[in-house]
C-alpha cells in the first residue's frame, strides 16, 4: 500500500483534484502550512479571549487525520521529515512525495513516452502504479548539479554555486551531512549531486527503516537548526538522495 504525502500553503481545494485519480486509492496526507483549512467540517469548541484570529482558528477548528497542521517553516522537506518521524512505526509500504503543482518538474517523457503532458493529471503509469515501488524512484526530471568553489566546469552537468542565491555553502552544512551519511565532503572540493527537483520521490519503506528513528530525528534537527529554514532546503534538496541511499545497519 502506498501513501501520498503533500504540503499545502495557499492552494485551493481544486488544486488537489488529481489525487482522486489514483487506481489503488492511496491515503492522501496533506500537511497544511497555510493560514486557513479547506474542505473540512468546522467544530468550534471554546472561546479564546485575547488570542489572535489565526491562533484561534487553528486551535478550535477540527482538522481531519488526512490534513495535518504544520507551522509555515521548512517547506515541503519539513513535512516529509516530520511524517517519517511521527509515522516511523507505522509507515506505508511506499511514500509518494509530490508537490501539489507537480507540473513544474514532472518527467513526462519518461513516465508517459509519446503522450502530451497534461498539467491537471498525473501520467497513467503513476496513477496505475505501473512502476517498481520497492526501489527509489525519481518522479521529476533527473537533475545533476555540481558545486564548484574553484569555478571548474565539468562536462555534462550544471556547474554552479547555487547556494550563493540565498546562502553560501559552508563547511558546517557539509559537516552535518557528513555526520549523517558518513561522507567526507569538504567545502573546498567540487561536489556533484543528482536529485529530483521539487523533492518528488517514491520511497520504499525499506529505505526509511534502514535508519533508526533516532537517526531521522538527528536529520530533522539538523535541517531545522539554521534559520531561515528555506536556506537549508536548497541544500537538502540537492543531497536528499544521500539520505535515502544511506543505510545505518
Image: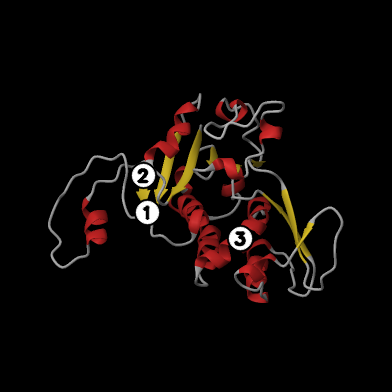
Secondary structure at numbered mark 2: strand
Q: Which mark is residue 67?
A: 2
Residue toward you, 186 or 36: 36
Q: Residue at x 52, y 60 (%)?
A: 214
Q: Position of residue 79 (x, y in %)?
A: 47, 53
Q: Which residue is mark 3?
A: 236
Q: Residues within 10 Å of mark 1 (few under 14, many from 20)?
A: some
Q: Position of residue 109 (x, y in %)?
A: 70, 33
Vertical position of residue 221 compared to residue 122: above or below = below
Vertical position of residue 25 compared to residue 223: above or below = above
Asked if marks 1 and 2 touch (Cβ < 8 Å), the reply is: no
Question: Gap in Å between the C-alphas at discs 2 and 3?
Answer: 25 Å
Residue 130 visible? The answer is: yes
Q: Which residue is mark 1?
A: 34
Q: Residues within 10 Å of mark 2 (few under 14, many from 20)?
A: many
Question: Gap in Å between the C-alphas at discs 1 and 2?
Answer: 11 Å
Vertical position of residue 188 compared to residue 162: above or below = below
Q: Residue at x 22, y 60 (%)?
A: 53
Q: Nearer the viewer, mark 1 or mark 2?
A: 1
Q: Earlier in the sequence, mark 2 or mark 3?
A: 2
Q: Residues within 10 Å of mark 3 (few under 14, many from 20)?
A: some
Q: Is residue 9 left or right of residue 219?
A: left
Amino acid at each position: 500500500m502506498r501513501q501520498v504525502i503533500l504540503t499545502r500553503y495557499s492552494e485551493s481545494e481544486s488544486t488537489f483534484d488529481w489525487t482522486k485519480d489514483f487506481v489503488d486509492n492511496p491515503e492522501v496526507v496533506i500537511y497544511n502550512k497555510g493560514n486557513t483549512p479547506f474542505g473540512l467540517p468546522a467544530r468550534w469548541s471554546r472561546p479564546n479571549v485575547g488570542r489572535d484570529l489565526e491562533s484561534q482558528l487553528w486551535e478550535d477548528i477540527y482538522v481531519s487525520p488526512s490534513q495535518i497542521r504544520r507551522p509555515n517553516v521548512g517547506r515541503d522537506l519539513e513535512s516529509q521529515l516530520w511524517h517519517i518521524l511521527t509515522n516511523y512505526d507505522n509507515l506505508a509500504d511506499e511514500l509518494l512525495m509530490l508537490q501539489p503543482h507537480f507540473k513544474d518538474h514532472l518527467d513526462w517523457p519518461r513516465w508517459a513516452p509519446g503522450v502530451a503532458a497534461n498539467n491537471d493529471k498525473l501520467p497513467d503509469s503513476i496513477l496505475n502504479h505501473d512502476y517498481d515501488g520497492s526501489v527509489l524512484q525519481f518522479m521529476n526530471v533527473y537533475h545533476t548539479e555540481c558545486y564548484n568553489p574553484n569555478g571548474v566546469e565539468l562536462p555534462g552537468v550544471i556547474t554552479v554555486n547555487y547556494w550563493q542565491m540565498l546562502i553560501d555553502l559552508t563547511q558546517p552544512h557539509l559537516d552535518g551531512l557528513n555526520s549523517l551519511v558518513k561522507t567526507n565532503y569538504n567545502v573546498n572540493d567540487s561536489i556533484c549531486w543528482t536529485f529530483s527537483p521539487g523533492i518528488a520521490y517514491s520511497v520504499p519503506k525499506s529505505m526509511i527503516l534502514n535508519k533508526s528513528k533516532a537517526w531521522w530525528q538527528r536529520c530533522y534537527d539538523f535541517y531545522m537548526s539554521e534559520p531561515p529554514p528555506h536556506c537549508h532546503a536548497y541544500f537538502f534538496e540537492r543531497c536528499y538522495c544521500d539520505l535515502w541511499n544511506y543505510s545505518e545497519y
